[in-house]
Image (tube, coloured by chain):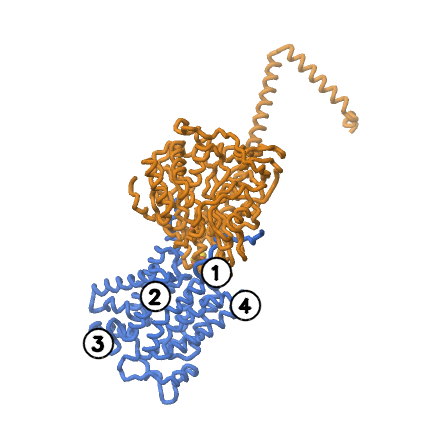
Amino acid sequence: MEHQDKIMPRRFRGGLKLLPNKIQSTLTPIRRVPIPEKLVIPLSQHIGRDAVPLVKVGDDVLKGQPIGAADGDVSAPVHAPTSGTVESIGMHPVPHPGGLGALCVVLRSDGKDHAIDTGLACLDYLSLSPEEIQDRVRRSGITGLGGASYPTAVKMSKAEDRGIKDLIINAAECEPIISCDDMLMREHANDLITGIQIMLHALSAPRALIGIERDKKRAIDALEKALASIGDERIVLRKIYSIYPAGGERQLVQVLTGQEVPYDGFPQDIGYLSQNVGTALAIKHALIDGQPLISRITTVAGKGVHLPGNVEVRLGTPISDLVAACGGYCDGAEAMLMGGPMMGFSLTDDQLPVIKGTNCIVVAGPGELEQTDYVMPCIRCDKCAQVCPVNLQPQELYWQIKGGDLDRANQLSVDGCIECGCCDYVCPSHIPLAQYFRYAKSELRARDRQQEKSQLAKIRFEDRKTRIRIGEDSRQARLAARKKRLAEGDPQERERQIAASVRRAQAKTDTAVEPDKDLSQ
Amino acid sequence: MKFESQFAPHITPSGSVQRMMQRVLKALIPAAMAHVYFFGPGLIFNIAVAGGTAIAAEAVMLRLRGLPLRPYLMDFSALVTAVLIAFTLPPLVPWWIPATGAIFAIVVAKHLYGGLGQNPFNPAMAAYVVLLVSFPVSMTSWLPPSNVDIGIAHPALGDSLYYLFTGNLPAGQAMDTITAASPLDVTRNQLAEARNYTEIKTGPLFGNFAGKGWEWIGIYSAFGGIWLLYKGVIRWQIPMSMLLGLFVTATVMYLLNPGAYVPPGFHLFAGAALFGAFFIATDPVTAPASPRGQKIYGAGIGILVYVIRTWGGFPDGVAFAVLFMNMTTPLIDHYTRPRVYGHD
Ligand code: SF4
Ligand code: SF4
């Protein structure tokens, strides 16, 4: 255990010191939300292609039974969070920044919570090959639980192919209010370490670095105790400063290793794989307890809820049940967010289901999440550039995007924006900068896709031309061959030819109209 | 339960243009008090006239441009411009000088270029230069500071007001009997007569560091400026590099020929150097954005101030240096853009 007491240098520029506002939700242990009567389970809870339904209306399912299968390489299966009957399969609103709906399986719980044998558990994971573990992780439907929801197995197998120097465990929950990882570490430190060990094995990686903010004292204590009792030299705890967004994947890699992830690549490209603590715990649940990803820990906080705290909740549970488990709404609850106040998005309805990426629900009380009043012009004060953790010049990007010059914004690397919102927070003109950058990024992506499409169309067109040419060539080749055979005096061929031309000639005379009209003129 | 939807981030922003400008105004108080102490209440009159005109001009321009009055008038930026103009004026000027300055700054230098945040030139400095060219005599007639004993008494309050409103002193008093050349002018003229600074410094206008009175206004501006730094309204790069640019250039020249040039300390405390470093050059709208760019920009201003003071024909170099460097801002911005994370 090296440098346990040293704090890593901060290494990235900018960022913000924000009020953590996490105490309120860390005073009580993690509560359980009762299993609801009806669960709405979206088939797309991850980045990549939606899962395809495996069940029909009226089917009885058991807890842990797959109800949606991964579709293609980048996708993840979905499992029944409890036992019951499939009531319907159809479009339902889901938590999504754009407020879109998705195909969902609606499950009526039978209250028995009978589990299926998933075949995921394994007495000795060391006896499994890395590929087998990755396969079980894939079958467990585990996605990054920090919020991004990228299928974990896909990330792991890509990383293992390339060779990993360090597995990076992201325990830096840097956004204000969110405390689910903190509570998870306090209460499940041993299981978490087991999960990390499994991942090390599955990645054939020599070392794991846990990056944790130094002010999470109780979580650090719990992890240190667990590490001491398990005694695994490969797992190292690294304390970092609490600066938002130190928990951003790229920022954490930078803080822990001193290296920058290439703008067009992933940490895997430089030998690091980063995973959230929740993901590590989910891997333990899958490989040791045989439980696929059907529940998660979620923070419920904000001034709009009576007893803020963390809850363990089955996926598919309506958010209103979480609020109820936390004492219900206070008077004047004003707004609801999924995620933290910096990067989260607002929800318009508390009947939406909890999904794999639901790390936090903020219920804002009166005036808690004050929105920008009047947007003033940019005064070029440069405060945004001072806090941008990736060194962008937000004022310049804003200027270009506002003027409609997306190409210039692209040249100025708007795609490098991690949408952390630091620039928004400090902008004295209250310009919704990150909103502009989100817009520009999605426009540019859409344009790329469009370009790809027309590229594809062009290729198809070229292909068709080639095919036609090939067709012509072969037709000519056939003709030539036939001529040759004729010239060579193949008698059968000659007969066939003569018969054919006679037939053709007859056909012509039969259909010809007024054949001598031409002659009369 | 249903909720309204809103954009991220969902956190109250940390500041506002209004607060920034209010802080700039507060930070000007020490320098203003020193100014009044040494030059009488003229500054207050000038602030009142320039401020009133600026706000009126701002309101008219906002109306014409179809912009809402409230948020823009409440941002105090017009008032800051007006106060900065007032600081550049001699204490005793007729009312149309601050008024013209304010109108030019707000209407031409600010709104005709697109309003808040769009103007390439510092409006207060642009106004100062226009006034200097249009009213050269009034703009260079300074009262001697009150602690200088050369037998000139400041006019009485009533007489000052009379002058402010009419442009004339009451019968029997002449402007040129109550004004004195500024220390920077004196120094330049006398250096031209081949006297060296040690001699010049013994004149009645000179104090510990530079001109009597002036040096203290500079020092009090620096106090205000340091408070702005502390509050994060301005950053250290521009003031620091501007003062360093001035100091280093002055030191080099002085070491080359101590007889012909003024020591560097004088330059720092003379004229508007300190005031300009903290309150003029730091105007964010017209300065480069990156820290590296700001250092280049500041150093450029410092060097130009020295050049204009030493070889140019104007009383002080700050306004011209700032305006000149304003022109280079887009260029500096272009060449000093920082490397983005993950890019080579
Ligand atoms: S913080 Fe806002 S006002 Fe300041 S430069 Fe950035 S965008 Fe412009
Ligand atoms: S939102 Fe983008 S531009 Fe703004 S500070 Fe974060 S990374 Fe920089």
Q: Which chain is orange?
A: A
- Chain in blue colour: B
Disc marking residue A377: 1
Camera sees residue A13:
yes
Question: Is the same chain shared between marks 2 and 4?
Answer: yes
Residue position for label 3 = B202
Report which residue position mark 4 lands on: B64
Q: Amino acid at mark 1?
A: Pro
> How far apart are labels 1 and 4 at the CA level?
17 Å
Which is more foreground, mark 1 or mark 3? 1
Report crowding for label 1: few under 14, some 14 to 19, many 20 or more residues within 10 A (C-alpha).
some
Numbered disc in front, either 1 or 2: 2
* Callout in the foreground (2, 4): 2
Q: Is residue B146 left or right of residue A45?
A: left
Percent across and percent down for residue B144 are 31, 79
Labelled disc at residue A54: none
Which quadrant is home to the N terminus of chain A? top left
Residues at marks 1 and 3 on the same chain: no
